Structures are given as structure tokens and as C-alpha cells.
């Protein structure tokens, strides 16, 4: 592999995208939509002239052509400013210069501090757990028990991640699983791409269907003025289809690598990459047993992950979920009678191991900040709406899917995307005759597909954890993306006819 064929590091790629976004703010016209926000029983309309309080009534929503019920605001289901249809207006150009380019990543780190600390504390917890030796024993035991049935490790765990992604929007939580699954899959004879595919592709494909995801489906449905259960059966059906396709695709690749290690895309493009979790490697031991102590520690590890998932489903604060990992790390140290100095040393070392990953998440937010400050996000939405507004129904929904895929390249937040786009495209859907549920589904499918590669998402942090290049990932994932696009388009076109 020649040095010239290597792509820049993930952080460099993100910074280059920030520069491109800044250049776009000088080229594209600036503009934005007025927004409506709810706070303490009052509506506020925000435009270029400032804020204006308007009556908090259903009549106000109807007059603004916002197809959302008043109680959705009062219950907290809609908690972000909603774009008001038909209010796009041009603004004075606000091109982002050199100063903004360097401030954006720092602002992104500040804005994403809750997720960043969440990841750092996960790193600390995992390193403390690793110090006990229970991780190595667990991997050895499970690897021995699954001997000859390694494909089921892929099938069952991929289903688990797609289900969690679809049911509760699992994303960042998946990063906690790499330390135990990477050595497990390597011990099974697979390469470093397999755990990334199982965890990251699994959660991304799950988010594609999102049959009851409160952070995307419910918010988007409310913003589009429909009940979130409208379209549920279609999302359940595509969950089954896309999960089967994803599992088949990963198993097919994994079995090929197991049969011939030189067929590994990691080996072909990255060379002999060292596992970032070498300390978890083990030698084969037919008499491997966990023992009572290791069983208890493994239970605590899995219970911590389970509480984390429950916390996100129950809408705990990010601080509360993060505190779970600190408490669990301290409990593990107490059970194993770990010295205080060693506990602090390992916890800090673990946090440090995920620092580059956390920085990528923060820097990626800088891209959205540049576009927002340059007032071009609304412009992109406005011209996109104008492009598809007079299209035939079937073409409209397919092009809308593609547009949501493009939007996902610059807008990482699913809830932010929903409240920004749903009122606009929901209004267009009424004119074109497309059911509102298909607008929501196009949004879900588009974000789920492009979530697999968008630089503002988790792809670069996920690859950084396992030392795999973005080039290798692109080569692996594009056939799956092509299949998902076709399946999604077919579902949407059929859905418009039902």
C-alpha cells in the first residue's frame, strides 16, 4: 500500500469539511426561515427583526400553516424551534472567514461537551474493568463456547444493535461495546471491520427504520402534524428487510475473511493493523471458566450497559447516564479492592484513550455551526423545496429521500433535522398529494442511510476506535448503501400508493 493512497486522518478530514462549508457561505446566498418556539406557556416567533410573542393557541399554529397540535408543544414533545412554512427570506451575506473556521471546532466541542464527557467516562470505566482481568476471561470463555458457531455472534448481536437503533435511537451508546467485541471477533477469525459493521452499521440501519424512536420518529411525526403510529407497519416491515440484508452482508464478508485472511479489506487497504485492544487477547484454553468473581464483574459490566440503554429510553439527562459509568467503575474498584492510586491511573488512562474520538464528535459539530452562522442551511432547504414542489408524487418522494441523504451530510441531529424540515416538506406533501407518513419515512430512511458515511456523524470516531481507515470503510459499505437506497425507494413509492 503506497503512502500516496492513504487518506488524511479523520480530524483532518473534518477540518477540511469545515473549510469547505465556510467557502460555501461566501458562494451561496444567505437566508433563513422564521421560527416558532414554545417556552413557559408562550409562543415566540423569531425573524431577522428579532423576537415577537404571539398567542399560544391552536389558531396561531393554523394561521402559520404549522400542522402541529398545541398539546405537542405543551407536553414537551416539540422542544426545538420549528421552521415556519413560507417565511424564507434573504439575509445579508455573512461569509465565514478564517477566525470563524478556527472558532467553529472549539464551539463544537463546547456544544457537544455532554457527549464528550460521556465518552471519556466510558473510556475510564472500561479501563478500570479491564484492569480486573474479567474482560480477557470473558472473551476467552465466550470464544471457546462459540467455537464453530461464530456466525451466530454476528447474527444475534447485529439484530440487537439494529433493534436498539430502531427502538430508541442507539448511537453514541454503541461506542461502549467495542472493547469487548473487537477481541471477541478477532478471536473468531474475523477482521477489524466486522465489529464496526456489527455495532456501527447495526445501529445506523436500525435508525433507518426507527419504528418507535422518540428522538426522530415521534418528533418528526409531531412536526409533520401526524400521529407517530401512522406508517408504523411500513417501518416495522423495512426494519425486518433491512436487518436481514445487513446481517447477510456482514456474515458473507466475515466468512470470506475467516476462510481467507488476505481477502480482508483492512489487510488490503490498511495493511497489518494492530488491534487497539491487544491487552484483551488470549490464548486458547479448553478449560476456560469464568469463576464466581469474574461472573459477578461481567454481570456488573452488562448491567451498566443495560442501565445506560434504559436511561436513554427513559429520557435521563446525559449527565445522569454518564454518572452511571463513574459509579460502576468505583463499585468495580471496591469489589476488587483496587488501590485508589491505581484506580485513578487507569480511569484517566481510559479517558485519554477516547480523547481523540471525543474531539472528532465535537469538531464535526463545527461544520453545522459554520453553516448556521453563515445562514445557508435555510437556503439549502428553500431551494430543495422549490426543486421538488411541482414534481409528480412518485418522483417527489424518491427525490426527497435523496435530499434527506444530502441534508444528513451537514445536519447530524435527528431532532434538529425534523423540526427544521418537516413543517416545510409537510406543507409540500399536502400540495403534491403524498401522505405525511411518507415524508417522515423519507426523512428516517435518508438519515439512516447517510448516517453510515456522513462526517458529522459517528463514522469517523467509530473507525478511529478500531484503527480502520475511512477508505477501507467506504470500500466495504457502498454496496450495502446501494441496496438500502433501492429498498427504501421501493418502500416509499409503494407507501405513496397505499
Image: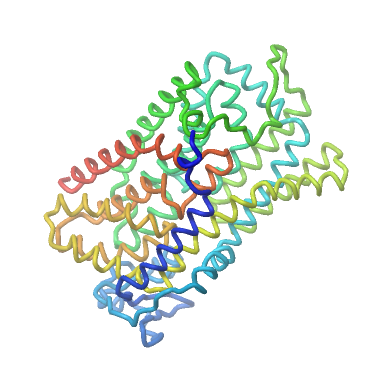
Residue furthest top as drawn: 286
Q: How far across and down, in percent of the image, does residue 406 sit? A: 32, 55
Nearer to us in this view, 267 or 41 = 267
Write down the quadrant of residue 206 in the picture.
top left
- Image coords of residue 76 (percent x, y): 46, 66
Q: Quadrant of the C terminus?
A: top left
Identify the image's colour scheme: rainbow, by chain, secondary structure or one colour.
rainbow
Percent from the top left, x then y, of residue 247? 41, 29
* Foreground residue among 107 and 290: 107
Relative side of 100 to 234, left or right: right
The mark total stands at 0
The quadrant in which residue 179 appears is top right
Q: Position of residue 319 (x, y in %)?
A: 64, 58
In the image, residue 153 sits, relative to residue 375, either above or below, namely above
Residue at 59% across, 37% down: 178
Q: Residue at x 52, y 54 (%)?
A: 12
Left or right side of 209 for 148: right
Of residues 309 and 248, the one drawn nearer to the viewer in this rendering: 248
Relative to 232, residue 359 above or below:
below
For residue 18, above or below residue 230 = below
Q: Quadrant of residue 449?
A: top left
Amino acid at each position: 500500500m503506497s503512502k500516496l493512497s492513504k487518506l488524511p486522518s479523520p480530524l483532518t478530514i473534518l477540518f477540511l469539511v469545515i473549510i469547505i462549508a465556510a467557502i460555501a457561505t461566501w458562494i451561496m446566498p444567505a437566508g433563513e426561515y422564521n421560527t416558532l418556539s414554545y417556552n413557559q406557556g408562550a409562543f415566540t416567533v423569531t425573524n431577522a427583526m428579532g423576537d415577537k410573542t404571539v398567542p399560544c393557541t391552536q389558531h396561531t399554529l393554523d394561521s402559520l400553516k404549522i400542522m402541529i397540535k398545541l398539546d405537542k408543544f405543551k407536553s414537551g414533545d416539540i422542544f426545538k424551534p420549528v421552521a415556519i412554512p413560507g417565511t424564507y427570506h434573504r439575509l445579508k451575506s455573512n461569509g465565514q472567514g478564517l477566525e470563524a473556521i478556527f472558532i467553529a471546532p472549539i464551539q463544537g466541542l463546547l456544544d457537544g461537551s455532554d457527549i464528550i464527557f460521556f465518552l471519556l467516562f466510558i473510556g475510564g470505566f472500561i479501563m478500570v474493568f479491564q484492569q480486573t482481568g474479567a474482560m480477557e476471561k470473558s472473551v476467552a470463555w465466550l470464544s471457546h463456547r462459540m467455537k464453530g458457531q461464530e456466525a451466530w455472534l454476528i447474527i444475534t448481536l447485529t439484530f440487537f444493535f439494529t433493534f436498539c437503533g430502531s427502538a430508541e435511537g442507539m448511537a453514541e451508546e454503541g461506542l461502549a461495546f467495542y472493547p469487548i467485541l473487537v477481541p471477541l471477533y478477532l478471536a473468531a477469525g474475523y477482521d477489524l471491520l466486522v465489529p464496526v459493521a456489527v455495532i456501527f452499521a447495526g445501529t445506523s440501519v436500525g435508525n433507518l427504520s426507527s419504528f418507535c424512536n422518540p428522538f426522530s420518529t415521534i418528533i418528526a411525526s409531531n412536526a409533520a402534524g401526524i400521529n407517530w403510529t401512522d406508517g408504523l407497519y411500513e417501518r416495522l416491515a423495512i426494519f425486518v428487510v433491512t436487518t436481514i440484508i445487513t446481517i447477510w452482508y456482514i456474515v458473507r464478508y466475515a466468512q470470506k475473511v475467516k476462510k481467507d485472511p488476505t481477502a480482508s479489506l483492512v489487510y488490503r487497504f490498511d495493511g497489518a493493523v494492530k488491534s487497539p485492544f491487544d491487552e484483551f487477547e488470549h490464548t486458547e484454553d479448553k478449560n476456560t471458566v469464568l469463576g464466581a468473581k469474574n461472573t459477578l464483574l461481567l454481570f456488573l459490566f452488562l448491567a451498566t450497559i443495560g442501565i445506560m440503554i434504559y436511561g436513554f429510553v427513559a429520557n435521563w439527562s446525559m449527565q445522569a447516564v454518564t454518572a452511571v459509568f463513574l459509579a460502576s467503575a468505583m463499585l468495580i474498584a471496591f469489589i476488587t479492592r483496587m488501590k485508589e492510586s491505581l484506580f485513578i491511573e487507569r480511569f484517566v488512562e481510559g479517558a485519554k484513550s477516547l480523547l481523540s474520538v471525543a474531539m472528532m464528535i465535537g469538531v464535526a459539530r463545527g461544520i453545522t455551526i459554520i453553516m448556521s452562522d453563515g445562514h445557508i442551511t435555510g437556503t439549502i432547504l428553500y431551494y430543495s423545496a422549490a426543486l421538488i414542489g411541482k414534481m409528480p408524487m412518485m418522483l417527489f418522494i424518491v427525490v426527497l429521500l435523496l435530499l434527506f441523504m444530502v441534508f444528513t451530510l451537514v445536519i447530524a441531529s435527528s431532532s434538529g433535522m425534523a423540526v427544521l424540515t418537516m413543517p416545510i416538506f409537510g406543507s409540500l406533501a399536502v400540495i403534491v398529494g403524498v401522505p405525511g407518513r411518507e415524508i417522515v419515512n423519507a426523512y428516517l430512511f435518508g438519515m439512516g442511510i447517510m448516517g453510515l458515511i456522513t462526517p458529522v456523524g459517528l463514522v469517523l470516531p467509530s473507525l478511529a476506535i478500531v484503527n480502520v481507515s475511512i477508505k477501507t470503510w467506504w470500500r466495504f459499505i457502498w454496496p450495502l448503501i446501494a441496496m438500502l437506497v433501492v429498498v427504501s425507494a421501493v418502500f416509499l413509492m409503494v407507501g405513496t400508493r397505499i
